[in-house]
Amino acid sequence: MRDACVRAVSSAMGRDLRPAELRDIEARFARNMRLLARVNPSEWVKKTEAERITEAGQAAAKELVAEARRRRDNLEARVLKMQALTDFVEAQVANGADATRLDAFVRVLAPRADARGAPEGGALDQKAQGIYADAVRNLVDVFEAGKRRGIWRFIPFNEPGTNRMLRRALAGDTAGLPPEFVKMAKQAHDYIDLMRRRYNAAGGVIGRLEDWGEPHRWSDVRVMRAIKQRGRAAVANDFALAAVREKYVHEDGRLFTPDEIRAFMDEALTTIITDGANKRLSGDRPDFAVSVSANRHRAHREIHIRSDAIEGLLNQYSELGAMESLLVHMRSLARDVALIETFGPNADLTAKQMLERAYDQDVAAMPERKTELATKRALNTYLYDYLAGNNQGMRTNLGQTLAFFRSWATFKSLGFTVWSSLVDPVVMQHVARARGLDAGKLWINDVAMFAGSGRRWAKRAGLITDTVVNAADRVNLDVLGAPELGAQAASFTLRATGLNWVTEARRGAYGLTMMDSIGHLVRYNESLAAIKDEGDSALLRMLNVSEDTWAVWRLAKLESMGANHTVLSPQAIDAIPEAEILALFPDADPVMVKQDASTQLLGIVKDELNTAVITAGSRERATLGVGTTAGTLSGELIRSIVLFKSYPWTFMTRQWELAQSIDGGANRAAYAASLIVSTWMTGILINWIYDLLNGRDPGAIDPASAEGRRNITAGLMRGGGLGFFGDFLFANADPGARSQSLTAGLMGPVPSLIDDTQQLTLGNMNQEATGQDSNFGPEAVSYAQRNLTPNWWYTRAITDRYIFNALQEELEPGYNARRARRQFGARGTTYWWPAEPGAPMREPDLSRAIDGDMPERAN
């Protein structure tokens, strides 16, 4: 480092530099020279070398001083955060809410439904989900605008016309664009900047780019593919030709030459290729587990593209559309804000230190349980890394292939699931009563949401953001992370069958009821401490907020929505005058105070929605995937196995936890018994509907007959959160389907598809080789029926009878009659719409469901 530079920086700092500082300053000095030159290159060139050195030295010195101050402040903040969380963990164990410190630490990461304690301000998962929901609710206008354009309802993000307009709006090229897109671009930029300020206020450092438009989610796969096809120089040249030349300057103010820009872009390609996995959203991670910190100080952070060139370059080298890029970016910001607000700066270090201390203390107190405690520590570590985005795994061809098959399994397998969701109202009512909500008002809100009233309000309130962005969270699959064709197929099924529409109504109704109940408490209680009514205790235990947040909620003008007249909504919090916030907190930023109050409300409500309208949360997903790594054979196999099993797992774990929140052993037993019986009866009803939609008379439930007992048991499996076993039972009871072993069923849809394919190909080849009849034709038709066509509830009976059954009968005469006889023998099933094409139809015999009278033969 030149002596003049050392003297300039030392003079600006007022002291001699230490050796460690000298090693860092030269790079810092050069960067500041370039940044200052970029502001006004023509004026910078006119300055003498001494003037440039002095200004850059002063800027570098200010950076060093600011960083030293920030390190000091961050250390203090980290110590305070750790102490507060440690106090919470110790209090949980001391008051008997948790048996071990490791059990208590889980509550810092993700809420539990037992309402036996939570850190003030909410758990990490709760905070992140609240922040992300708050972000999405601010973008409802553009989603609605896209849906009005027709096809975007089913292919929501990458419809070319919509994507083009959105990219132009984000780049600042707004001429001739619809006003809602221009408004959305400004809202997105404003909200992302608000989250950046919130992150920095908690001790982080994210700078602000004045010309920032759309997040650049460059694809390592597409870049590598283009390099292989066209050569690295050609790809680097694509980026260089699109660059904003004024952004690339030397320390003395000279612009980069075209060759120098190409050399810089060549280096940027290296960071894209090697760092791509850190920038990608994967469907097996929580919504927010994509780190923005992974992109800081990387060359691809300094790719500045002209607004007229950004669309073409992103279309060529990014796998995400404009809206997907925004959503992923917002998720990553929500995750980082939640991390730093929960654990303070250097969240990884704080969390790991707390985990090790909790483990050591628990082992010291209970040495006989060391093995069990080690398992809990491993689960906690995995859960933290899962939430923090630290175990993202690798992007491999195997992972992409199986992600496609998981998406395809959703497309072909969930056509009837909307009818299984009839169990939702039963669960919602039980959860509402356990939480002290008005169950009657919940029924009213549910009916109103199905009638259409309040859906738009619910979207603006952030209650149904999952279906708004087209996520398939109810089956543990996020379509944003899957390959395009599989993602679109899965998304299409969930919308075309009505599952998302129904889920929106359920979540909107429960969320509205909960916000009304919280608002009622806020209106009539000046503080949390003032709440004395025992009837409010169940709801109160869920409100893990501070008195400061309660004071902000008290300022909101509560809304009326239908039968609800004390609704505390994010919209109501948004409308609080800034002067009233400043009157409470004179030194605060009113906008951030209101956003924090909104996101805490949404975090509480969103997590409770996952209990009432069963949806796997991060804790359940992490439990199912503990010890696995995305992209590896074992990791991808586990992800395939747990697909569709997150629902029953979540049902059982959350309802068990919820029962623990009910006072009195008898009351808990009554809750459990009522839930089991009511969902059991609902399961029987769902099976009757399945029978009718498939052209069968409803199965008898006469306990005096073997078939009736079997159907009664099937109702328990279908409605009691054990849906997988119910599906297995019915799959093997339907002679039209190939009999599947329990092992194959347990392995999930992807291994089962492989097994199915093996039986069709190698199995038939073996039969031919040994001189047996292979029946390849009929088996191929059955294979296509099971694996290659959608299983939608309103098309299944028609396609079966007029396409597949007709083909089967043509290939194997008498096939449908034999199938009907086997079905009759297995379940006593008779058909109101016979399987044979052209056979006469009759009205369904509904009386058989109750009286159990059995005809002498199958019709």
Image (cartoon, grey):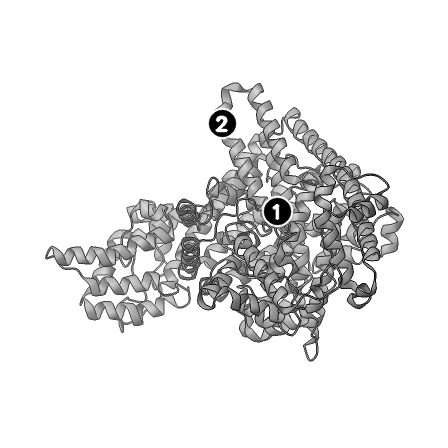
Q: Are marks 2 and 1 in contact (CB under 8 Å)?
A: no
Tell me the element at label 2. helix
- As measured in the structure, the alpha-carbon distance from the residue carrying label 2 to the one carrying label 1 is 29 Å
Visible in this render: residue 496? yes
**Residue for point 47% across, 43% down:** 625
Mark 2 neighbour density, 10 Å: few (under 14) some (14–19) many (20 or more): few
Front residue of 83 and 299: 299
Front residue of 384 and 113: 384
Residue at the extreme left? 771
Residue at the extreme bottom? 176
The quadrant where residue 533 appears? top right
**Residue for point 47% across, 61% down:** 483
Q: Pinpoint residue 219: horizontal percent, then vertical percent.
A: 53, 61
Visible in this render: residue 199? no
Q: Pinpoint residue 762: horizontal percent, then vertical percent.
A: 22, 56
For residue 608, which numbered disc appears in the image? 1
258 left or right, relative to 252: left
**Residue for point 34% across, 61% down:** 787
547 left or right, relative to 649: right
Q: Nearer the viewer, mark 2 or mark 1?
A: 2
Count of picture labels = 2
Mark 1 neighbour density, 10 Å: few (under 14) some (14–19) many (20 or more): many
Q: Pinpoint residue 352: horizontal percent, then vertical percent.
A: 60, 34
Give the quadrant of the C terminus: bottom left
Amino acid of disc 1: Glu
Q: Pinpoint residue 134: horizontal percent, then vertical percent.
A: 68, 55
Amino acid of disc 2: Glu
- Which is nearer the N-term, disc 2 or disc 1? 2
Instruction: From the image, tell me which residue sits under label 2.
Output: 372
Front residue of 419 and 633: 633
For residue 445, which numbered disc appears in the image? none
78 left or right, relative to 779: right
